[in-house]
Amino acid sequence: MKAIIVHGGSGRFKQHKIERAKKGVKRAAREGFRILLEGKSALDACETAVKVLEDDPVFNAGTGAVLTIDGRCELDAAIMIGSSYEAGAVGGVERIKNPISLARKVMEETDHVLLVGEGARRFASSIGFEDYNPITEERLQEWKKLRKKLEAGEDVRWKKIRTLIKKHPELLSGTVGCVVLDDTGEIVAGTSTGGVFMKLLGRVGDTPMLGVGTYATPYGGASATGLGEGIMRMVLAKTVTDFIQMGISAQDAAQSAINLLTDRIGTGAGVIAIDRRGNIGYSKNTPDMPVAYIKDGMDEVEVFI
Ligand code: ASP
């Protein structure tokens, strides 16, 4: 059984970005599924789908990711193989086009799981990743507006983060993620993000932390999105895969984990999941989360927000 599900981040998408986001997740699911139809692995399909999303500036990952409080673009990503528990991740890496591919290289070519900042950047250069500026004009303009508010003493402050994100859920939206099952039964999960708008330099979120933003086991895989500071405290992705391993359906696992986070932490989040039979699950407690999926037996990608 082949199946793929992708998300484009939980939060609120501005009206003019909704159609773009739906198109973007559809294209990513279709491209990832095409890789599976060619007989390639879940790992290749996951990387391909996440790269499509990273290259689409409507999402907060790769090109067009959000900026730190001082106007820089620090990216996080992780990828994990369920059967072997192998994983690779990068945190706070600058000037790179596809962090998901760098995360895969960390898994395949180093003895480590997570590289951060300057070290991750240096590793990227030494294995031939080109220097790339992911900052788009659109994000720069958004950043300038937020920066002005901040300088005027308005509420764009981390100490008020819950209130801030509740008031402006669009500050969150756009992280990307993917979970894939291939015909061999392999499950792979991947997630990529620019983090949260106006984050402090050096802040790393849930995305590259295994079990938190990204996790895969032989039984299931999950990719999370939303406010990383909440997701970390709930260890969200592993909670979902643990539920799946206990025999709970992918849909109920996703829903229950989000319910737990909502009750206990109260921050915004969403999650997608797949189990080893190809059942998919997704849940969110925010206004939007673009999602697309396709599996054997379906003629067209299903998309919603
Ligand atoms: N989870 C990401 C982070 O906190 C943000 C997001 O999903 O929108 O870094």
Image (spheres, rainbow, N blue to C red):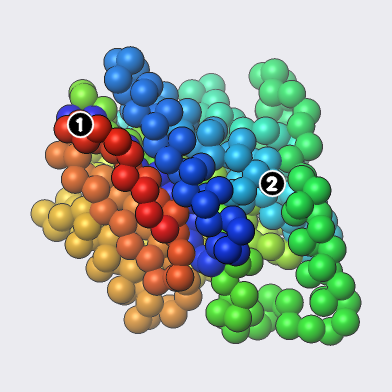
Where does the image place residue 48, in percent across and percent down from the top left?
47, 28
Query: Which element carries disc 1, helix, strand or loop?
Result: loop
Alpha carbons under labels 1 and 2: distance apart = 32 Å
Q: Quadrant of the C terminus?
A: bottom left
As drawn, is 202 to the left or to the right of 212? right
Foreground of the two, 78 or 31: 31
Alpha-carbon neighbours of circle 2 within 10 Å: few (<14), some, or many (≥20)? many
Foreground of the two, 162 or 13: 13
Q: Which residue is mark 1?
A: 296
Where does the image place residue 234, in percent across and percent down from the top left?
39, 68
Q: Is residue 182 above or below residue 161?
A: above
Q: Is residue 167 above or below residue 227?
A: below
Where does the image place residue 110, in percent across and percent down from the top left?
54, 26
Picture residue at 60% right of the left edge, 64% below the top: 14
Q: Which residue is mark 2?
A: 64
Picture residue at 65% right of the left edge, 83% below the top: 160
Where does the image place residue 143, in percent across and percent down from the top left?
79, 61
Of callouts 1 and 2, the N-terminal one:
2
